[in-house]
Image: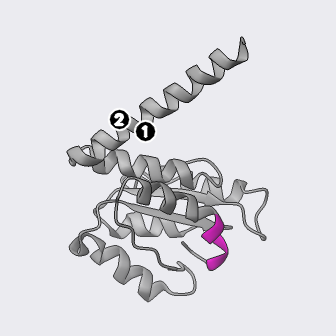
Amino acid sequence: MGSISDMPVMQEAIDILKGFDIETEVDIVSAHRTPEKLFDFSKNAHTRGISVIIAGAGGAAHLPGMVASMSPLPVIGVPVKSSNSIDGWDSVLSILQMPGGVPVATVALNGAKNAGILAAQIIGSSDKCVLDKMMAYKEGLKQAVLNASENLNK
């Protein structure tokens, strides 16, 4: 994440990934205040066994795009509505509007939960244990809706 103030939002991704028993690495890497750390992290994440990067940022939200420009890994951007934000639209558009060749999968504003789920799905495409847990998770979502529907008519 770009700032410690992003942690309450990003915690949802951490919680989802831990729920799938996926190891997480959490850090603050600011595109504007710690560019050297950003370069090192982005260029070397794949050598440390990281499979997917979730990058959350508010305001100008350059972190996800900068990471994607230097890393061969899939990057999921989480636009964060911050105190200096323009209702979050600046963050959404900064992450969403990437140039051709530098994709960033973008979730909804403050959508870290979905970023965690998407990361788990990406990992699950090559890890059967995670895939099985994802299938059970999806079945749980389905059952929750069916149960709510059934209880509605009682």
Evaluate whether residue 23 shows in this view. Answer: yes
- What is the three-letter code of the residue carrying label 1? Tyr
Side of 117 where 131 appears, left or right: left
> Which colouring convention does the figure follow?
one colour
- Mark 2–mark 1 contact, CB under 8 Å? yes
Local packing at callout 2 (Cα closer than 10 Å; few below 14, some 14-19, many 20+) is few
Side of 82 where 95 appears, left or right: left
Question: In terms of secondary structure, where does tag 2 sit?
Answer: helix
The residue drawn where x is 54% and y is 72% is: 1
Height in image: 85 above or below 89?
A: below
Picture quadrant where residue 137 is located: top left
Q: In this rendered view, identify the residue nearer to me: 148 or 7.
A: 148
Where residue 102 sits in the image (x, y, percent)?
39, 56
* Bounds of the magenta segment: 4-8
The residue drawn where x is 51% and y is 87% is: 34
Q: How many labels were placed on the picture?
A: 2
- The residue identified by callout 1 is 137
Local packing at callout 1 (Cα closer than 10 Å; few below 14, some 14-19, many 20+) is some
- What is the three-letter code of the residue carrying label 2? Met
Q: Is residue 153 magenta?
A: no
The residue drawn where x is 30% and y is 76% is: 43
Question: In terms of secondary structure, where does tag 1 sit?
Answer: helix
Height in image: 37 above or below 109?
A: below
- The residue identified by callout 2 is 135
